[in-house]
Image (cartoon, rainbow, N blue to C red):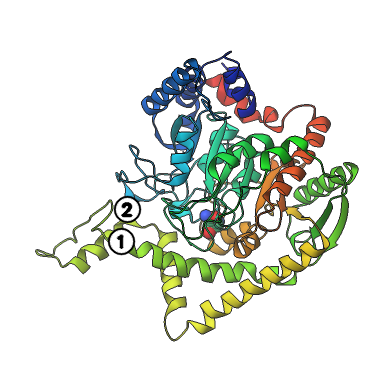
Amino acid sequence: MTNELITSSASELAARLAAGEISSVEVTQAHLERTAQVDPAIHAYLHVDAEGALAAARAVDARRAAGDQLSVLAGVPIAVKDVMTATGMPTTCGSKILQGWVPPYESTVVTRIKAAGMPILGKTNMDEFAMGSSTEHSAYGPTRNPWDLERIPGGSGGGSSSVLASFQAPLATGTDTGGSIRQPAAVTGTVGTKPTYGGVSRYGLVALASSLDQAGPCGRTVLDTALLHEVMAGHDPMDSTSINAPVPAVVEAARRADVSGMRIGIVRELTGSGFQAGVQQRFDEAVQHLRDAGAEVVEVSCPSFTYALAAYYLILPSEASSNLAKFDAMRFGLRVLPEGIGDPSAEQVMAATRDAGFGDEVKRRIILGTYALSSGYYDAYYGSAQKVRRLIADDFAAAFERADVLVSPTAPTTAFRFGDKLDDPMAMYLNDIATIPANLAGVPGMSLPSGLAPEDGLPVGFQILAPAMQDQRLYAVGAALEARLLHAWGAPLLACAPTLNAIGQEA
Ligand code: GLN
């Protein structure tokens, strides 16, 4: 039975918790029950911490009863992507090489979530080391999309997008190195933000590509996402790239939802050919809604974006091959002894462990990155990619002279079927064509639903990009569009998910 505690937004739950109408234990329990019902079919979680979540819920209820001053989201439960360390829970990052590893330290993001009084329901599934766009690269098997169980939920953060779309959690965390928050949001009809690089601490996250990685909030509404953004963001002395400046006023912007007089730039290179017809159609309609809400729409050109994917697939593997060198069978997780060798050397143990512990996509990128960084090729590959990165940042700077935010579809297609792109890495990589430029330039981006594609009835994502440290603009535009679309649809998009309702009833 669908319980209204699980279909409520986080902001509604927060208000009812603050008013004393419901307890965090009730809310947390309702979500754990939902997970017990539906997650066997969806597989969004790698680890559920029922006991820990309920203990945190009891603690926050007691603090509220004692009259303590609590944070806005106190008592609202959350799911955490398995790339983020949390004490007392395993962190696998979707990899066999970290199976059974319980970290002795904790990410700043998780510490802040705990300090805000938010019970952590569990750790969500992901592509191994956040490499992928479908969760098919998870060593623990894929997560299914609640809209159609034969389709991908996006990646790498498909577990986080699916817990939201299947009402197993009102909020979740993600990380976005090339689109892993925004693309999963797009294909599941949910909302996700990649904040400005340095806006949210990377301390305690398992690194993929350190100059691109950014943690961020995932929710079902723009306001919910903003509320979590404020919990996660802010300066952290433990992360040398953390920005020491006030957090952009994202909640205020989401509440005001005002785009009047704002200049919205459509990126010519990120629309039109290569995008599914229904994706383009919903994008065009969304732009019209923003015009109707008082925004001025212009077209901008960012010619270097054409090279973003190529540059990303040199920079990311280079950084990843270096970051992943620490998984050496000595310090973390798995240790495999080579067969048939009586007294193996450390190198032989490392080789056997890395062979058994890493999946194909991870190996592919380590090989690519090691090659790109090798002394004979460094300038030709890594050096050239860094130059392209500069050109992309310059394109953004020029575009933001003409527009306050830039917009595009988030992903070229709606959710594809399992197996469709698994054997063709290039086809998989192309999913992130519209999201990668933001990571290369360090600017913030959001995806929110803009409807269902007429040809397949699946969610379409609308992307908004803003200049660095202007994250609040994403929320102003996102909330304005969301309000208009809600009015046009008459109900939230997720209320329409056919399989979602079926999953609830079967159980
Ligand atoms: N899909 C992209 C990749 O495979 C993005 C990953 C991410 O953002 N973590 O690299």
Which of the four quarters of the rendered structure image does ligand 1 lie in? bottom right
Give yes or no for contact between labels 2 and 1 (Cβ–Cβ under 8 Å).
Answer: yes
Residue 249 is left or right of residue 142, and the answer is right
**Is 344 rendered above or below residue 411?**
below
Mark 1 lies on residue: 354
Seen from the viewer's position, the closer of residues 123 and 480 is 480
- When asked about the image quadrant of residue 496, the answer is top right
Q: Is residue 60 above or below residue 207?
A: above
Q: Residue at x 43, y 54 (%)?
A: 238
- Residue that numbered label 2 is attached to: 97
Image quarter of the N terminus:
top right
Q: Position of residue 284 (x, y in %)?
A: 83, 49
Which amino acid does the dot numbered 2 rest on? Ile
Q: Residue at x 57, y 75 (%)?
A: 386
Residue depicted at x 39% and y 30%: 49
Mark 1: secondary structure:
helix
Viewer-closest of 70 and 162: 70
Q: Residues under labels 2 and 1: Cα distance? A: 7 Å
Residue 463 in view of the camera: yes
Q: Is residue 307 left or right of residue 368?
A: right
- Give percent across and percent down for residue 462: 73, 47
